[in-house]
Amino acid sequence: MQTFIISKILLLLSLLMGIFLHAQVTVSGKVNFKGKGVKDISVTLKNTYDGATTDENGNFTFPTEEKGSQILVFSNAKFVEVEKPITIANENLSINSDLKEQISEIDAVVISAGSIEASDKKRATALLTPIDIYTTAGANGQISSALETLPGVQKIGETEGLFVRGGTGTETKFFMDGNLVNNFFGNSIPGIKSMDRLNTSLFKGNVFSSGGYSAAYGQALSSVLILESIDFPERNSVDLAISPLFINAGFQNVNEEKSKSFGISAGYSNLGLVTKLIKFNNDFTKAPESFGTNFNFRIKNKNGGILKYYGSFDTNKIGLQAESLEANIDFDNTNLKGKNTFHNLSFKKKFGQYLLNLGSSYTYNSSFIALSNTFEDEEINPNTIDITGNYLNTKGTLGRKINKISAVRAGIEYNQSNEKTDVSAAPTPSEFKDQITSLFAETDLGFSNNLSAKIGVRSEYSNAIDRWNLAPRFAMAYRISKTWTSSLAYGIFYQNPENKYFGSNPLNYQKAEHYVLQVQKSAEGRSFRLEAFYKNYKDLIKTTVLDYRPVAINNTGNGFAKGFEIFWRDKKSIKDIDYWISYSFLDSKRNFQNYDQSLFPSFAAKHTLSVVAKKFVTSWKTGFNLSYSYASGRPYYNFQTDANGDYYLNKQGRLKDFGALNFSLNYLPNLGKKDSKSFTVLVLAVNNILGQKNIYGYNFSTDGLRSKPVLPSASTFIFIGAFINFGIDKTQDAIDGNL
Amino acid sequence: MKKLFLSTLLFMAVSTYAQTNFEKAVTDKISKMEQAKTPEDFTAVSNDFARIGDKEKTQWLPYYYAAQASIEKGRNLMRTGKLTELDAIAAEAQNNLDKASDLSKDNAEIFILQKMIHNLKMMVDPQSRFMSEGMLGADALAKAEKLDPENPRISLLKAEDIYYTPEQFGGSKSKGLEMFQKSLDQFKVYQPKTTLDPNWGKGEAEYFLSNKP
């Protein structure tokens, strides 16, 4: 009886439920963000299947059979989720909602004033990845040369270094995984530019800052290049490179879990053969020759910390004879022997919200230059300059995330340099020691996805200068519209006078103040940037010659650089062609070192233009690359000293405009052979294909009466080489790169 | 005793009812996905699936389909050349696929979608992303193949890759078509585990084979 009643009740209940279930009501409404309807918002009746997605105008509507107290959820990754309690009776409901923007790393505006980032972290329009560098004609696979096609960088042929926005080459510093790289370039002799010491393929990305960079970096008045090494190679491989210029072999080993890897590589290069084939403007008594080897290992621990090591040893030699400008001397002879070792260790680990970066680099560099003259086949005036240096850099940074796009970080950096210069003609060797301790703190503040700022401060104490400096930095970015962003940067930057200029006079930090304003548009496959800058130099050193070497006497020098730059990259407009154009306008004056007055610096051109274009022709398995560089004529100066030893300007002039059309092609014969064990790239490169006669400057005789031009080593340079990789099948790489 | 019997019956009735409701909802949405044309359509259907997944909490399929709808949206945008949006869409798909994979480990179908997500990300910037996304995609597909070697969708993805790869790079239309044929042959014998399990792709293989150049 009892069960009968229960079953009756149950029957009734289910009957009622059935009626209820079929009593549909419609829930509709509009979802707004800043008063405008937004599409693609998911509207859900919580814990039911019921819901809808808003249309173009933010409207939604869905039927439901649910009843009573319910929760309506509005969700979309770009907005903060909203929950609204509602009560569903028998009538249709209309519910509107306003949304708030979800602040996120992906959508947040990036501060880009002064910097060009080429890592894959955020932007699809990444610049100068290793592949870009290898396929830039005229760059010879070198990072620094490829950067010369970007705005703000001068094309300087006679000296190594990145000359940025009216700054000297020494005003740019290089960092690998956060650590300072001393002697980024090979040892060289005046007039002949040396190559990058670090191989392009070591790096997965880079940030090149031509001004207003972060407080985490210092001791650079103009610019920093921050290189980030690759984490783990994809597979075991053996590499071979052969050309009339060099041979190189190396291998990389990586375990299956990609938690440990190591590699060794060695190379030998000799220009001897090439000097016989190509006409050189220099008379080499010893064609440039070098030997180098390097090692690396990387270990990832169980908690995700990564330890990376890279170390290298190299030696190089070069001998040069040049007709002398001096009376009673026939030839000037220069011989260089260089030795260098560089070691870089870095460790990176995340602890919850904290990120720890520790690193250290050590460099030993020795450059031995033997100078002499020849007169009537007799060697006279022998002199040697022997510079040896030990450099240590150690840095620790701890960062913490505050919210999704805000963070604070602080760190300490220590630099030590010990340098000894022994000029045989001088009575005593000069020794220089300096220790710089730096503290820095910085905060990234994301106010919304459209507005963010970076505020930082850096303070340094140098033994050699014996005082602290204080350098505030500030940058912000604002998104004007979907594709346009603007950003600005301001900062004070200090740099010690170069070690070689220290003498008995007390010196101060050299100072530069940067103002950078940028607008940028990035759309599908195209990007445009316009940047204007003003740089104010103070406390630059003034020099005099003492004991056969220039020595700084005070910090009364000053100067400025201002200008604007345009950059345009387009991968879309012309089918299968990727090209970029950069133009820089620079106005600059400085009174520093041996300048006796304010002058437009001799290492800067007023107008600089670069055009780079690349095309891969699939059916020929060949990539064609062209680049054209133009720089308006730089000024040149000859300074003489008067009876008091003071400099005065004896002669000045303007070089003719610089221009070079470069061409290279990459042929990939193994492309498409599915099971080929090796992958080969054959490269043919011709720099300055039209043979334009370029002059980098003038050398003057001691009395300033006679001069001769400083010329490129070779007017037109041809390179052929084969790069073979066993183990890694890069076929797919090539395909996807050219889809 | 009778009481117990009755309530069990009732419970069964309710749960059967729920089951069919789930099945009906998923089947409905699958057909909605098949008819989707615009990116907005795919967003809506992806949201619908996610809603079902959130309610059920133990079913991997709704999240799987939610991810698939996002991927289809991405492929749709890719065809119209809108590459910059793909990162966000891949993230959206990944979010749902991760939920599916939490509920069903070692599932070949999930690895297949994983491969497709890596493809989307790679297309944003193939040159610099091949080494990362390309490899990860290949890894995912290899895992799928290990778990379910006869799955026709694995052959389908391979066929697509080969078909669109120029001959100079080791791909070819004819080899691609051979692979599509293999995929189609596999479809003929392949039985999804349940009526709701993934069963897509046959049409695409047929499309390519019927449009032989």
Image (cartoon, coloured by chain):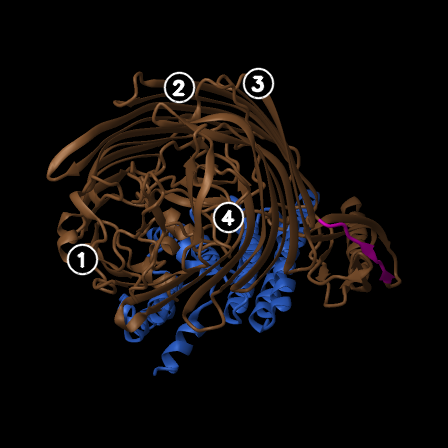
Chain colours: A brown, B blue
* Pointers 4 and 1 within a single chain: yes
Upstream in the sequence, badge 2 or badge 1?
1
- Chain label for disc 3: A
Amino acid carrying label 3: it is: Arg
Front residue of this view, candidates A183 and B53: A183
| The label number, if any, that marks residue A467 in the structure image | 3
Q: Nearer the viewer, mark 3 or mark 4?
A: 3
Q: Residues within 10 Å of mark 3 (few under 14, many from 20)?
A: few
Please tell me which residue is depicted at 59% across the width and 71% down the height of the picture.
B36
Q: Position of residue A536 (x, y in %)?
A: 61, 40
Write down the residue under mark 2: A432
- Identify the residue position indicated by label 4 in the image: A117
Q: How far apart are labels 4 and 2 at the CA level?
A: 36 Å
Residue A97 in magenta stretch: yes
Work out whether residue A274 or residue A204 is closer to the camera in this orientation and state it: A274
User: Is residue A267 in sight in this rendering?
Assistant: no
Q: What residue sits 41% from the left and 70% below the top? A: A576
Q: Residues within 10 Å of mark 1 (few under 14, many from 20)?
A: few
Q: Amino acid at mark 1?
A: Ile
As drawn, the label of residue A278 is 1
Kindly identify the residue that appears in the image at 73 percent across and 50 percent down: A101
Q: Which residues are magenta?
A: A93-101
User: Same chain for marks 2 and 1?
Assistant: yes
Indicate which disc, 4 or 2, sits on the residue closer to the N terminus.
Answer: 4
Q: How far is mark 1 from mark 3, CA to CA?
A: 53 Å
The chain ID associated with circle 2 is A
Q: Amino acid at mark 4?
A: Glu
Residue at coordinates 33% horizontally, 24% vertically from top-left?
A389
Labels 3 and 4 share a subunit:
yes
